[in-house]
Image: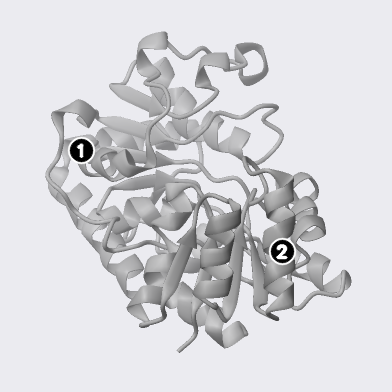
Amino acid sequence: MTRILFFARSSKYTLGLPQGFRELNCPVFVLRDLSRDSIKEAVDHFRPDLFITTGWAYRRHKRKYIDQLVEKVAKHRIKHVYWATEDPRWTEECSFECIKIFNPDAILTIHPESVSIYQRLGFPAGHLDFGCNPEFNKYEPPSSKYAYDVALVGNGGKEWKSYRKDSVQTLLRPLVERGHNIAIWGKRWDRFNEDLMGFKIPKHILKGELPYEETNKVYNSAKIIIGLQNDQDMLTSRTFEVLGSGGFLLTMPTRAVKNLFINNAHLVCSSSPEDTVNLVDYYLKDGKARQEVAQNGQREVCINHTYKERAKQILKFL
């Protein structure tokens, strides 16, 4: 059985893919912090067959320990796959830097169009979406703390150069301007660029950062969850997490969304600000219809888009 060493600190990752491998009965060692002893325990003692790194894997760790980890993995000839979860927005700043530091054997990316970039660099490469972990992304009783008509969990943009800007203009702006009962959790919203975006966000809507462990409570407590998308051809992790939690997801009709999900069945897509207002008004009034869509979406991701399925994809790719 393949033994997995998974290097990540954020709960967004540690509560995801490792669980998928465990469900395949693969022994998993999650390496969150680096030290001489932790590296020795993870590599020399655990003796993994596969080493997986993700996202901004080198951040918040001393470079000397990163180098020690990479050297040990190479010494033991452990296969190393880098999962490029920041493509395509941060390919140069993040993915290329991780490749330079970690020198992986192969690369998987959440952005299908980026596969060819890595292949041209000489790496075996493939596409791997985010997924959901049914052990975490699941139904739980609603919490009054997060009981809003509409909620958004996600970080605000810095320069708003990606498709995320279109998502905000279509999904968030019309509801803010109409004074809906909204809550926003995430970084950088307190520095929202009103001049660039063309509207203001009232301070009382902004709830600050939210620990990842609390996100599932939001998805089960708010009536409608806004799901921003970053690109036409890739899906955010929250797309799968909201659906897996049984939340009602309002998102954008991107190619990636339409490729995996059915509008008005698994989730609901809005193509314009006017569409957003009409959809929100309708589904806030019709709780039964809202619940039916949410249940369909949850069933779909729990069958086809769990991290167990993603783990199978990785092993098949290898």
* Mark toward the viewer: 2 or 1: 2
Residue hosting label 2:
70
Name the residue located 16 percent from the left edge and 42 percent from the top edge: 286
Image position, residue 131 (x, y; %): 44, 63
Question: In the visual, does 262 lie left or right of 190?
Answer: left
Q: CA distance from mark 2 to mark 1?
A: 43 Å
Name the residue located 74 percent from the left edge and 56 percent from the top edge: 67
Find numbered disc 2 in the image and state the secondary structure of the residue it sits on.
helix
Q: Give the residue type that dot 1 points to.
A: Ser
Find numbered disc 1 in the image and state the secondary structure of the residue it sits on.
helix
Which quadrant holds residue 275? top left
Image position, residue 107 (x, y; %): 70, 69
Nearer to the camera, 194 or 268: 194
Residue 83 shows up from this direction: yes
Is residue 103 placed above or below 85 in the rendered structure?
below
Position of the N terminus, as image quadrant, is: bottom left
Q: Give the residue type that dot 2 points to.
A: Val
Position of the C terminus, as image quadrant, is: bottom right
Is residue 207 placed above or below 105 in the rendered structure?
above
Nearer to the camera, 169 or 184: 184
Question: In the visual, does 174 lie left or right of 248?
Answer: right
Residue hosting label 1:
221
Nearer to the camera, 250 or 20: 20
Name the residue located 65 percent from the left edge and 71 percent from the top edge: 81
Is residue 166 placed above or below 199 in the rendered structure?
below
